[in-house]
Structure formats: structure tokens, C-alpha cells
Image (cartoon, rainbow, N blue to C red):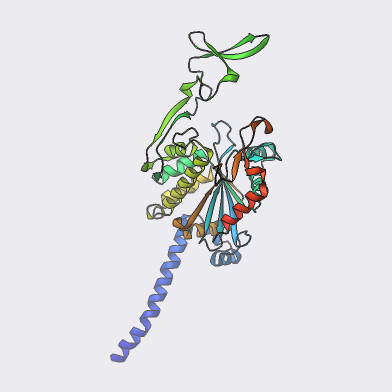
Amino acid sequence: MHELGAKSRRRYPVVKIILLSVLVFGTLLSSLYFFKLDKYVLKGPGSVVKFITDSGLKSENGRTNVLLLGIGGKGHEGPDLTDTIILASIDKNAKDVVLISIPRDLWVSDLRAKINHVYAYGQEKDKSGLLSAEKSVSQLLGIPVHYAFRVNFDGFTKAINLVGGLNIDVENSFSDPKYPIEGKEDDLCGLTIENQEIKGTKIQVVKDATGSAIPLTEITDQNDPFICRYETLNFKKGTIEIDGLTALKYVRSRHGTNGEGSDFARSARQQKVILAFREKILSSETLTNPKKIINLFSTFGDSIDTDIKDDDIALFAKIGTKLDTSSIRRVVLDTNEKNGKLEFGLPQNYSGQAVVIPKNNNWTELSEYIQSEIFKH
């Protein structure tokens, strides 16, 4: 009896290990199924090896660089202009991630345009928006871009609503009196536009009910008479819960008070929302809800464009589960007089456009700065 008990005790660890292995493998397969990754990871021996060993993703010096783009999409003014441009640099062990926000007004001399136009130009020319954006960012910043991922704002708002909204820490209270209302971009707000001849020149003017007229060419943010086209946003300092539409307004606001009206402040808010969304995606509330996961994939499938291959999707998903938000480093390129790496270009040198360029127009110095930030650890 004693001998039989000893044998049972010796076998018990083996049985426990086998049961544990079955449970882990079953959980993995279930996760792969619900995340729609089974068809990628289980395609063949090569895919399995890549998934297990973390090999296969394009990289250089141990890092994979992914360009994240956000566009308005159909129904928005400039539907293919990239309102959000972020470069994510991830080390092979997912222990170090750097998010670099690129200002939409950064000048691209080859195109004689701002960088937020590059994707749109590529799409209009031959549907090469992603490749065009990758090449421009790589050339301007002096680092390789291995993959690109573009999402439109309709998919962005739907996805946030699907996960139940986000918790965001608003660092600065601000108001924005000129957030455009969708569908009212061309509303005349009860005014009329007429042609007039002034000093022998025909011009268009905006007239109100009293007959007062303002030449269209003289309308600025300060004297814009089309006030019905805008709503006023208000965000108070502190942690807030926001739905998809409010999140969109938070990241797109361009006329905020209290220092939040700059492109650079907006870039910081965009990074904040992306990280909050990632946290919500990886929460137990989302991961244990197969229907929610499938709906998310359906939502993104209808609103994304990417050059990430099928075989690499599982690898990205695996990296995503490893990331530690607290270790993510954020870099916002700005025009801060003391430490900023950018400056405003003279409009007369850039077809009258308001653009930003590297300080002293030194692109090499900007590239070296970005590389120093990426390889700081």
C-alpha cells in the first residue's frame, strides 16, 4: 500500500504537467480562433516557427518600425489627408517601444507639400498611399519604415464604442470654439455670397442681413462669419470617460485654449488615446468576450489599409500582448524655442503655406535626434 501511494505521488507531477499543457494549448487555440488568427498561425510549419520564435518581422538593428496613419475618410473634408501620423518603433522583445508623433505640417520638399498630403497623393495617383507615406517618412527622418497601418475615423469611433469607451487623463483644461460640425462645412449660416466689382476687380464677398460685406479672401479664424459651422468643445482637467465620438473630438481639436491649439499638443493627445485604446483591448473585459472581439475585427476590416502580410499578423498580435504601457516612451516633435527640434518656415518660401521644418533646415540633425531617442535604452 505504501509503495502504491509512493508511485501515485511520483506520477502526480507528470499528470499535472500534462493537464496544464493541455489547458494552455487549448486556451491558445481558443484565443487564436476568436482573434481570427488560427488561419494565419496554423497555415503551415513556417508560420508556427515564426510565431513560437518571434522571428519573421522585418527589422533593422533589432527594431521594427510601424507607421500609423489616421484619415477622415468618406464624408470628411480632405478624406485622405492624414490627420494623425505616428511612427512606432518596437524592439524585438517588445520591452521598449517609442512613439514618435510627426506633425501634419512637416514640409516635404520633393512634393512641395505638407506631409499630411503624401498618402492622399499616392492614393490619387495609383493607390500607393501607404508606400508613398512610408518612403517620405523614411527619407525625412533617416530611419527605415517596415510596415504601415491606416485607419479612418469612422472605424476609430466605432471601435472605441465597441470596447465601451476609454478612460483618459486630461492634463490641461481647454475649450475649442471652432470644432467643425460634420455636414455643415459649406453651410452659409443665413449669409449670402455675391460677386462684386471693387476698384475694377471682381471679387466674392460674404454679406449679412444688414448688407455689410467681407471679401472671402479676408476671412480669417478671427473674423469668420460662418459660426454655425462650428461647435464649442470643453474638456476639464482630470480623468474622464469618453465614447468614440468624444475621443475623436479630443484628438482632432485644433483651436484649443491653454496651449492645446498646436499641432504638437494634438499629437500628444493622439498618443494618449492610442495607448488607452490598447489597454482597453487587452483588458479581461474585452479578451473574454468573443463577440466583442469578432465585432472589432469586422469594424477594423472595413476601415483599414495595411501592408502587413497575413503571416505577420499573429506576430504583431503576440507583440501586442507583451507590451508594457508604463515602459512606452513618447516623443512629440515640436517648435519649442529651447528644446524643440522644429521651427516654422516662412510662408513665402513654401507657396504661402504654414509649415514646420527642422531648426536651421538641418534634416540631418533631426534624423540624428530621432535615432538617439529610439536607441536611448
- Residue 340 placement (x, y as % from top left): 56, 45
> Where is residue 343 drawn, in percent x and y?
60, 40
Q: Quadrant of residue 195?
A: top right
* Residue ranking furthest to the front: 338
For the residue pair 272 and 336, the one nearer the viewer reads as 336
**Does residue 86 appear in the picture of this structure?**
yes
Whether residue 202 sits left or right of residue 337 in the image: it is right
The relative height of residue 18 versus residue 61 in the rendered view (above or below) is below
Query: 205 above or below 175?
Result: above
Nearest the viewer among 57 and 358 is: 358
Q: Residue at x 41, y 55 (%)?
A: 287
Residue 121: quadrant of the picture:
top right
The quarter of the image holding the C terminus is bottom right
Is 272 situated left or right of 339 in this image?
left
Number of marks drawn: 0
Q: Nearer the viewer, residue 244 or 10?
A: 244
**Residue 111 image offset from top left, x and y in percent:** 70, 38
Considering the image in quadrants, where does the N terminus appear?
Answer: bottom left
Q: Nearer the viewer, residue 312 or 12?
A: 312
Residue extending farthest to the right is 110
Image height of 207 relative to 315, above or below: above
Q: Residue at left 49%, top 42%?
A: 156
Drawn side of residue 174 relative to residue 301, left or right: left
- Compared with 57, 299 (above or below) is above
Q: Position of residue 75 (x, y in %)?
A: 54, 31
Can residue 309 be seen in the rendering of this structure? no
In this image, 64 relative to 322: left or right? right
Most extreme residue toward the left is 1
